Image (cartoon, rainbow, N blue to C red):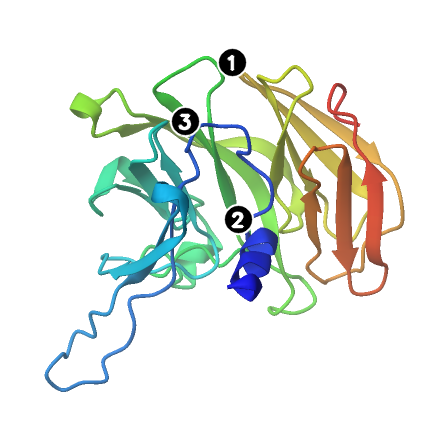
Amino acid sequence: MRFLRIFLAFLFPFVLQGQVKHDYVWIMGTNGQPTDPADPQGIFGVNILDFNGGELNITRDYRDTDFFLTNASMSDGEGNLLFYSNGCKVFKADGQVMENGAGLNPGVAYNTGHCPQNGNPMPKGMLILPLPGSDSLYYLFHNSFVWGEASPYLVFNGLLYSSIVDMAANNGAGMVVSKNEEVVSDSLFTDLHAVRHANGGDWWLMTSKTSSNRFYSVLFTSAGVSGVFEQEIGPIATPGFISNSTFSPDGTRYVRYDRINQALLYSFDRSTGQ
């Protein structure tokens, strides 16, 4: 159990700390492969991690999709699952595709067959935030998938997109009302994170350009995406290799790791995004 806690802490960095149960249900994994002749469909189910009830409860349930590397989910304030995504489609809590929920991250992920069934092949390729001040609008921030120029095994993100889910639509079943709006147009690493603004209501999203020391801070307020700020600081990231990063729980420190530079620790100003 101690190992599982440590694993989950690194897999899901600080995003919704302080929110009321919006991050209490996670869905991930694959449904499995057929191994029993009596069960030709191989219906074993994806993993559902539920933190309601004061402890982690893990179950499996068949859903008509798989998660490769991208997965994100959103619950209401009481911890009830609202919707989730594998970076290719948005699914309602019952597993059905939400209205207008197909076609996320158009491009090579679809052309190479990863979407729509298996999911977007980007580590930490999506996060979901409630729109500040709204009780029904949720923003999905998600990365597209691009092959590296030197080798198809050097994978990086092409663009940072946003899509919007309105849970007041369709009598509470939800609808994707905006999709694939460009936020940052650059070749990005797979290190998308969010942290609370110092004002306690808004958010900062952090991502960075591949093989560089350029960081992008995206300001997310009640008006939606309210600004994108660039800063170059610290050593150049290892060319061609995926970096990993996260915020400290209080949001004042940002740590980034890559193969050559190892761990780099930065101070972060939650007022300015610098």
Amino acid under disc 1? Ser
Closer to the N terminus: mark 3 or mark 2?
2
The x and y percentages for residue 110 are 40, 55
Quarter of the C terminus within the rendering: top right
**Mark closest to the chain's N terminus, 1 or 3:** 3
- Above-or-below relation of 217 to 248: above
Q: Which amino acid does label 2 sit on?
A: Gly
Checking the image for residue 222, the label placed there is: 1
Dot 3 surroundings within 10 Å: few (below 14), some, or many (20 or more)? many
Instruction: Kindly indicate the quadrant of the structure image that contains residue 40.
Output: bottom left
Q: Which residue is drawn at 46% across and 20% down?
A: 131
Q: Are marks 1 and 3 in contact (CB under 8 Å)?
A: no
Drawn side of residue 189 relative to residue 60, left or right: right
* Callout 3 secondary element: strand
Identify the mark at residue 125; answer none if there is no mark.
2
Q: Name the residue under label 3.
A: 138
Amino acid under label 3? Answer: Tyr
Q: Which of marks 1 and 2 is nearer the N terminus?
A: 2
